[in-house]
Image (spheres, rainbow, N blue to C red):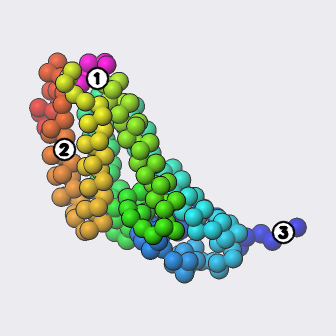
Amino acid sequence: MGRHREFDIDTALDAVTCVFWRKGYEGASYADLTAAAGVERPALYSAFGNKEAMFRKALAHYYERHLEYIPEALALPTSREVAAHILENAVDLNTRFPEHTGCMVINGVLAGSDDAEPIRQILVEARAVAEAQLRERFARAKAEGDLPETASPETLAAFLMAILHGMAVQAKAGFSRETLKAVAAHALSSWPVRASSPSAGVAAAR
C-alpha cells in the first residue's frame, strides 16, 4: 500500500492559492509554495503536479471558494443589480485579505516570460468567459426591456470588466476599500436604465 500523505490537501491548496494570489505565477517560487504548504517539494509534486498544474488547481479553487458571487449576480432580476452585486463583492474580495490584495485572475500573469505564456492564456480565456457571461446577461436584460434600446450589451460587459480589472490593480497598489467603493459607485451612477424600469427609481434614489 502507498504511504498516506502527511498533510491536508485542502489546507495545502488554500496555502498555495494564497501564494499565487499574492505573487502571481512567475513570482511564486517553489520555496514559497513548499513553505506555505508546509511540505517538501516532492510531496507537493505528488499532490498537485508541476507548477503549471498547481496553478490550474489553485485557480479552480479560487473560483469555487471566492467568486461564487458571480453566478449569484447573474441570477438577479435587473442588469444594474447584476453590476452592483459584482462590484460590491469585488471591492470586498480585493481588500479582504491584506496579505494578498487584488484579484488572483489579474495578479496571475498580465505579462510574463515565454514559459508563462500558457498561464497567461488560461487567464485571458477565464476573463473572456466572464465577459461573455455578462454580455449574454445584458443582452437578455435589453430584450426584457430592462435596458434602453440604445444600450449595447457588448459595451456594458466590456465597461464592467474594465472597472473590475482597474479596481483589482488599484487594490494591489494599496488603494483603500473606501476609494474602491467610491469608484464602484461612480461606475453605477452612469448605468443605463429605462425610465419605466424597476431599477430606475432605485438608481435615482442612490
For label 3, the residue is 2
Query: What kind of residue is marked 2?
Result: Ala
Tell me the residue that label 1 is attached to.
142
Q: CA distance from mark 2 to mark 1?
A: 19 Å
Marking on residue 21 = none
Residue drawn where x is 66% and y is 66% of the image:
49
Q: Earlier in the sequence, mark 2 or mark 1?
A: 1
- Asked whether the beta carbons under mark 3 and mark 2 sit within 8 Å of each other, the answer is no
Identify the residue position indicated by label 2 in the image: 187
Dot 2: few (<14), some (14–19), or many (≥20) neighbours within 10 Å?
some
Magenta span contains residue 172? no
| Front-lying residue, 162 or 120 | 120
Which span is picked out in magenta? Answer: 142-147
Q: CA distance from mark 3 to mark 1?
A: 57 Å
What residue type is disc 3 on?
Gly
From the top left corner, tell me how far across and down residue 9 is, in percent: 64, 64
Vertical arrangement, residue 18 with respect to residue 81, above or below: below
Q: Could you say whether the residue bearing mark 1 is in a helix, strand or loop?
A: helix
Determine the residue positioned at 29% across, 28% down.
Answer: 78
Locate residue 111: give its quadrant. bottom left
